[in-house]
Image (cartoon, grey):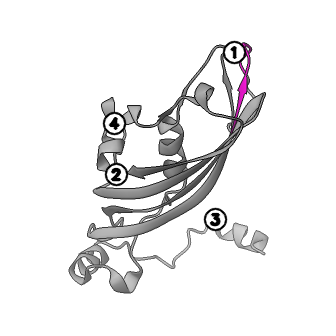
Amino acid sequence: MKVLKDYTIQFVSLKLGTHFFEYEVDNKFFEEFDFFEFLDATFKVELAFEKQSTMMLLNFNISGEITVPCDRCLEDLNIAIEGEEKLIVKFGDEPYDGTDDIVILPENAYEINVAQYIYEFIEVNIPQKRAHDEDECDVEAIKKLNEYKVKSNDKIDPRWSGLDKFNN
């Protein structure tokens, strides 16, 4: 938990206007969360924190790289990740179920920890399919996969042949 304390911003002492914060995010950061799926991760997060009289606007600029196993050959795959995310922070006692980019803090709040938001913003920018280009995958692994590839059977069951007329 000590790692995540570095992501706490005490906004009550900040003057109105824009303030800039930079964070270096690595494996230690992700280990604080229950879900850690990377072999390696390094990110730079730039936060433009705009304090207004009634709310705060947080603009995150995230850039970095993760190393994960390739979905096809299981060799290490480096993926560059970049993204920009926005978060609006308002004050009030009523919960808000509108959009994901608005956070309601209690009126007496004096700080915000942005670690969870950084984690979520990185996660949503990671592609679901993580594979090398086919010519970059491990040749031996591809050969082994092709041995188990299901051969297509061109013979169509006569019960389903009538469906061909609906194919546009």
* Amino acid marked by disc 2: Asp
- Would you name the residue on which mark 3 appears? 160
Looking at marks 3 and 4 on the same chain, the residue that comes earlier in the sequence is marked by 4
Q: Mark 2, residues whose alpha carbon is within 10 Å: few (<14), some, or many (≥20)?
A: some
In magenta stretch: residue 58? no
What residue is rendered at 64% in x and 13% in y? 108
* Residue bounds of the magenta highlight: 88-95
- Would you name the residue on which mark 2 appears? 26
Element on which disc 4 rests = helix
Looking at marks 3 and 1 on the same chain, the residue that comes earlier in the sequence is marked by 1
**Front tag of 3 and 1:** 1
Q: CA distance from mark 3 to mark 1?
A: 64 Å
* Amino acid marked by disc 3: Trp
Looking at marks 2 and 1 on the same chain, the residue that comes earlier in the sequence is marked by 2
- Of residues 59 and 167, the one nearer the viewer is 59
Element on which disc 2 rests = loop
